[in-house]
Amino acid sequence: MPAPIRAPEMTQAARPKTAEGDAGAAHGGPRFAPFPLASLAAIAALLATYLFFVRTTTGQYIDESALVEATDLYGPASKASLRFLDYLPLISVGLGAVGLGYACLVRRRWAASLMALAAAGGANLATQLLKNDVLTRPYRGIETFAGNSLPSGHTTLAASAAAAVFLVASPRWRPLVAFAGGTYAVGTGIATLVNQWHRPADVVAAFLVVAAVMSPAAWLVLRRGGSWNTWEGFGSHPGSWRLWVALPTLIGLGAAAVAMVALVRIAPGFGSEVSTTNYFWAGCAFIVISGYLVVTAASWLLAAASRGR
């Protein structure tokens, strides 16, 4: 009696290939919990920044002093940063368009690109709503220009464009993209301070708004693009060298040392010298620390969620 005919098994080679934008059914989905927790942490830090630097006299004094002392840098540095800020919207939109366009048209990560674009738009909308309709700046005896300026719109635009490109980048490139995009956003924030457009706390708040909005979007991108959101870990590619995580950490520690020295020199009981640029340098350090802290956290969060899935 002839043996029954068995249906041929589908081999690995016979399985249909999916576009990079399709869901990776064969890969485990990323854990959900770390992403809303990251978003909640950013919101809590944003609230703390607002309550101290805007709602208290001490916070307003520190923040405003950094803004006033920026006048000592008027000259070539101010002119260069002002020229950069004039072109910033065009630069940010251009960088975002190139990054998302490449991911969408070449890599076929359509869903991921749309999610990243929507999240970037949401971050900018949230900044405008918070600054103009939700947060207020009470008078605490500190002379300054009227009206609330927290969070910074220019910094949000730069940081959200960088974050959108970061989300759609391949995992092996994300650490490098995070460092480069974070450096661009930090430079934007410092430029707004040098030109007296924004106080340091305004810039820090912008970083936190972007982090809060982009964290849930990152989970959606990883869940939708499981087929391409995998990698072999740090060191497996030049774009994922540990250097790109170590650099922002080291720069942040260096900025913390600068802030400590600047503040100790004007603290009662220590140097007690009259500040000329100490608050300014402390404000710049505050921007650098917060910006690169977000960069490092984002790199580790998506690395942990992408590796080996």
Image (cartoon, rainbow, N blue to C red):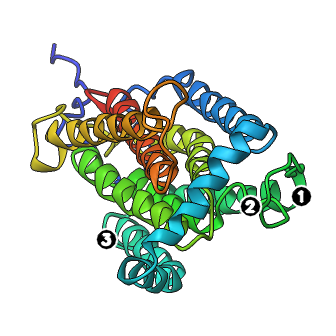
**Which residue is located at x 72 percent, y 35 percent?**
52
**Which residue is located at x 40 percent, y 74 percent?**
95
Going by the image, does 151 lie left or right of 245?
right
Q: Position of residue 278 (x, y in %)?
A: 46, 49
Residue designated by label 1: 133
Exactly how many numbered labels are in the figure?
3
Quadrant assignment for the C terminus: top left
Q: Position of residue 75 (x, y in %)?
A: 41, 82
Query: Which amino acid is tagged 2?
Result: Ser
Q: Position of residue 51 (x, y in %)?
A: 77, 35
Going by the image, does 154 lie left or right of 178?
right
Comparing 82 with 99, the one in front is: 82
Residue 267 appears anywhere in the view: yes
Query: Which amino acid is tagged 3?
Result: Val
Query: Which amino acid is tagged 1?
Result: Asp
The image's mark for residue 149 is: 2
Q: CA distance from mark 1 to mark 3?
A: 40 Å
Q: Earlier in the sequence, mark 3 or mark 2?
A: 3
Residue designated by label 3: 106
Label 2 neighbourhood size at 10 Å, few (<14), some (14-19), many (20+)? many
Of circles 2 and 1, which is in front?
Answer: 2
Corner quadrant of residue 58:
top right
Q: Secondary structure at mark 2?
A: loop
For residue 270, above or below residue 221: above
Comparing 263 with 203, the one in front is: 263
The image's mark for residue 25 is: none
Comparing 3 with 205, the one in front is: 205
